[in-house]
Image (tube, rainbow, N blue to C red):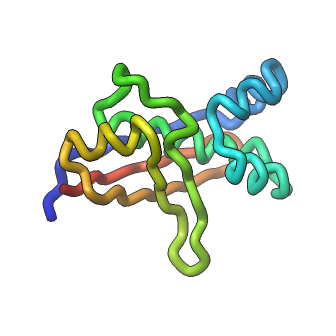
C-alpha cells in the first residue's frame, strides 16, 4: 500500500453549533448519518462531537478529490470502534469515488478542544 492523498480540516465548534441552531434537523440529516446523530446528541458536548465529524468529513472530501462528483456528506460516516478509535465508513458515491481513485484504506486522526476540531486523513491505495 502507498499513500495517494491526504486531507486536513479545522473548524470552529461555534460555527457548527450555529448551523444546528439555524437549520436544525434539516442540517443534521443532510450532513450526518442517523447513527452519528444518535451518538453525538447523547454526549455532554454535542456541538463539539458534531464539529469533529464535520472536520473529518471535510478532510475525507479533500483526500478523495470528489467534491464535485455528487458525494453527499452523509455518505461519509465517522464511527467509533472500541479500542480502535475513530474510523471512516464510506457508502454510495463516496465509496464509488474512492474506488475510482484506487483508495482502499482511509486513516483518520481527530482532535478537539473547547473551540475547535481538527481532522487529518491519509488515503492509501
**Hey, which residue is sitting farthest left in the picture?**
2
Tell me where residue 40 appears, x and y as whole percent.
76, 51
Measured along the vertical axis of the image, is residue 67 above or below residue 1? Answer: above
Residue 82 % position (x, y): 61, 77
- Residue 105 position in % (x across, y down): 30, 59
Q: Is residue 102 left or right of residue 49?
A: left
Quadrant in which the N terminus is drawn: bottom left
Tell me the residue at 37%/50% (across/down).
121
Q: How many marks?
A: 0
65 lies above or below 41: above
Q: Tell me which residue sits at (71%, 33%) in the image.
A: 29
**Residue in the picture at 48% in, 48% down:** 119
Indicate left or right for 79 with 63 as reference: right
Does 112 sit left or right of 2 as displayed? Answer: right
Q: Residue 60: x, y in percent? A: 40, 42
Give above or below for 68 relative to 39: above
* 66, 119: nearer the viewer: 66
- Which residue lies at the image location 41% right of the left edge and 24% below the top edge? 70
The quadrant of the picture occupied by the C terminus is bottom left
Amino acid at each position: 500500500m502507498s499513500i495517494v492523498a491526504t486531507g486536513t480540516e479545522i473548524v470552529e465548534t461555534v460555527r457548527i453549533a450555529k448551523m444546528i441552531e439555524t437549520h436544525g434537523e434539516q442540517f443534521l440529516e443532510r450532513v450526518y448519518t442517523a447513527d452519528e446523530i444518535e451518538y453525538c446528541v447523547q454526549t455532554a458536548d454535542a456541538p463539539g462531537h458534531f464539529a469533529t465529524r464535520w472536520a473529518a468529513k471535510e478532510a475525507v472530501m479533500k483526500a478523495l478529490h470528489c467534491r464535485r462528483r455528487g458525494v453527499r456528506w452523509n455518505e461519509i460516516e465517522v464511527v467509533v470502534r472500541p479500542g480502535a478509535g475513530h474510523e471512516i465508513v464510506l457508502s454510495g458515491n463516496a465509496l464509488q469515488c474512492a474506488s475510482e481513485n484506487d483508495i482502499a484504506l482511509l486513516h483518520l486522526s481527530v482532535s478537539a478542544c473547547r473551540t475547535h476540531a481538527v481532522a487529518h486523513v491519509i488515503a492509501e491505495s
